[in-house]
Amino acid sequence: MPQQLCIFDVQPLLNRYHGVFITAEDKLLFARHDTRASKETNYATATDFCDLFKKEMGRYYLLALMLTGDANAAEKCFAAAVESSQSGGVFSEWAHRWATHNIIKEAIRIVAPAQDTQPPERKAVRWNASPQQTMATLLGSLPALARFIYVMSVLEKYSDRECASFLGCALSEIRPARDRAVRQLGKMAEQLDGECKLRASA
């Protein structure tokens, strides 16, 4: 029986992992340092990253879910990326890219896609799922390496060379894996469209 991938509201995620965000007291303690650092270097501060992850929580969690293909792994990936991003050291205008970088880095650490050769179990798509939920579920049915390459290169616009460097695989593997992912996603989308038409006509 196909496994159903559950995507839930991100507020419970925030409640469970509130400890990885800077507290109100921490903000008061670090406010002076953050302001000085921001003015002198224009670096994104730890507070800036906390605010960014809270504001874009749905987006970053969805990225983690599309990469890992598993809700529990996506939570761990998200929480670890929040913590690693708070170390800062990047310019404010690069904060989003740095957060995305850390989501991908943590997802690779958790899943190890280059070593994962087991074919995944086909995941069922809920008939009333949103487009984002549907995409995450279809991606979860791809082999891990193909899934990572598709998300990184097609959705996040990383170059083939960057993908190979991140994933620890040969540059020559990237394009064939992406092409296979595109074909498989196309077939699954066609099948899903047919199932939706049958449901509508029933």
Image: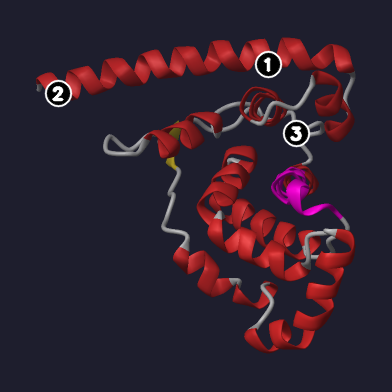
Residue sitting at x 77%, y 42% = 108
Q: Is 93 inside the magenta-drawn segment?
A: yes
Q: Position of residue 156 (x, y in %)?
A: 66, 31
State left or right for residue 198 relative to residue 143: left
User: On screen, 17 above or below 44?
Assistant: below
- The alpha-carbon separation of the residues under discs 3 and 2 comes to 38 Å
Which part of the image, by quadrant, shows the N terminus?
top left
Q: Is 82 inside the magenta-drawn segment?
A: no
Q: Position of residue 198 (x, y in %)?
A: 19, 18
When asked about the image quadrant of residue 62, the answer is: top right
Q: Residue furthest front?
A: 39
User: On screen, 140 above or below 146?
Assistant: below
Q: Amino acid at mark 1?
A: Arg
When asked about the image quadrant of residue 88, the answer is: bottom right
User: On screen, 177 above or below 22?
Assistant: above
Residue corresponding to mark 2: 200
Residue 46 shows up from this direction: yes
Q: Amino acid at mark 3?
A: Asp
Residue corresponding to mark 1: 178
**Is the residue under label 3 in contact with that under label 1 (CB below 8 Å)?**
no
Q: Residues within 10 Å of mark 1 (few under 14, many from 20)?
A: many
Magenta region = 90-104
Residue sitting at x 61%, y 17% = 181
What element does badge 1 sit on? helix
Q: Position of residue 56 (x, y in %)?
A: 56, 54
Residue corresponding to mark 3: 116
- The alpha-carbon separation of the residues under discs 1 and 3 comes to 16 Å
Earlier-in-chain disc, 1 versus 3: 3
When asked about the image quadrant of residue 33, the answer is: bottom right
